[in-house]
Amino acid sequence: MKKPARQSKKSVRPSSLQAESLQQTRREHATEIAEDYVEAIADLAAAQGEARVVDLARRLGVTHVTVNRTLARLQRDGYVTAQPYRAIFLTGTGRKLAEACQQRHTTVVSFLRSLGINEKTAELDAEGIEHHVSPETLAAFERHLRKG
Amino acid sequence: MKKPARQSKKSVRPSSLQAESLQQTRREHATEIAEDYVEAIADLAAAQGEARVVDLARRLGVTHVTVNRTLARLQRDGYVTAQPYRAIFLTGTGRKLAEACQQRHTTVVSFLRSLGINEKTAELDAEGIEHHVSPETLAAFERHLRKG
DNA sequence: TACATTTTGTAGCATGTGCTACATTTTGTC
DNA sequence: GACAAAATGTAGCACATGCTACAAAATGTA
């Protein structure tokens, strides 16, 4: 009876919509890198048959060490399979995620291009934006593309 | 003469546009939280004269401990001033950043709403998207709003 | 085969962001 | 003033992501 429970312990219940939005954004950040990796692995596999650590490092703009550690996490989470000194392959889950990401990326880039944004900026912005686009918003983008 | 410099040491020079985009996105992530905080502080100051740690915690959906540590960083980086057990205030730099963020947030939400997205989803998505919208894309959003 | 290069892996550090648990200060109330 | 509650601060942990430096395995070539 000493602690009169200053805050409700379970399920913080954010008092504002902003809190909820920010929590959502933080959750998205956690999956963002996984999405970038599986997408890159899928692209590399399509382009040259397999994805190697060095390829990923070059492509993602990080060192091979970072790639290595992130791959361990992706493996733990069931997105890829990998053995030491061997190429990296996507699991079924990973492949599905990669396809969804590729499609979403294409949609976001096309949408931005349709607003008159130049190609390079569209690519740069899409990379940051795409991970935060809800299905509803993605559908709106597609609708806009069909109409325009 | 032992090390033949396998990789160029300085300025990694990403070999792909994607690498460059991702590096940009990572840079944005670093400023993202600062933006959310200064915006929240500005809102609270406007609404009730001052921003306290508990208010920020509630509003941002994190514990007061996280707020406290992040505020130390914001203070270090010159966005806010704070003394122990006192309210938090924005510096000139912080105030300018907050205003830009508020305006950008409004634009992004209005833009999404104009595509037919419902208010709550627009808010949720905007929170994630807004930090990755370049000036060019923001201008395109505004243009679209004026036209539509 | 032997050696150099490339690739991959590991060790250890830094930063940022989140948390719980506990300590201290401030504030409100009797 | 004294006490309880609220607010704030601190200690220490976890995890994700980045890095450099070094070690080991794989690969290419003389």
Image (spheres, coloured by chain):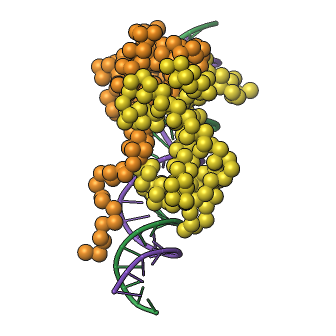
Chain colours: A yellow, B orange, C green, D purple
Name the one closer to the observer, B12 or A48: A48
Position in image of residue D21 (x %, y %): 36, 65
Position in image of residue B125 (x %, y %): 54, 24
Q: Is residue B107 visible?
A: yes
Looking at the image, residue A18 lies above or below residue A63: above
Of the 4 image quadrants, the one containing the N terminus of chain B is bottom left
Name the one closer to the observer, B25 or D23: B25
Q: Is residue B15 left or right of residue D12?
A: left
Q: Residue at x 59, y 19 (%)?
A: B121
Quadrant in the picture for residue C21: top right
Q: Is residue B147 left or right of residue A34?
A: left
Q: Residue at x 56, y 50 (%)?
A: A42
Q: Which residue appears farthest toward the left when viewing the image?
A: B1
Quadrant in the picture for residue B34: top left
Q: Which residue appears farthest toward the right when viewing the image?
A: A1
Q: Residue at x 63, y 48 (%)?
A: A95
Looking at the image, residue B117 lies above or below residue A30: above
Q: Is residue A18 visible?
A: no
Q: Residue at x 56, y 25 (%)?
A: A142
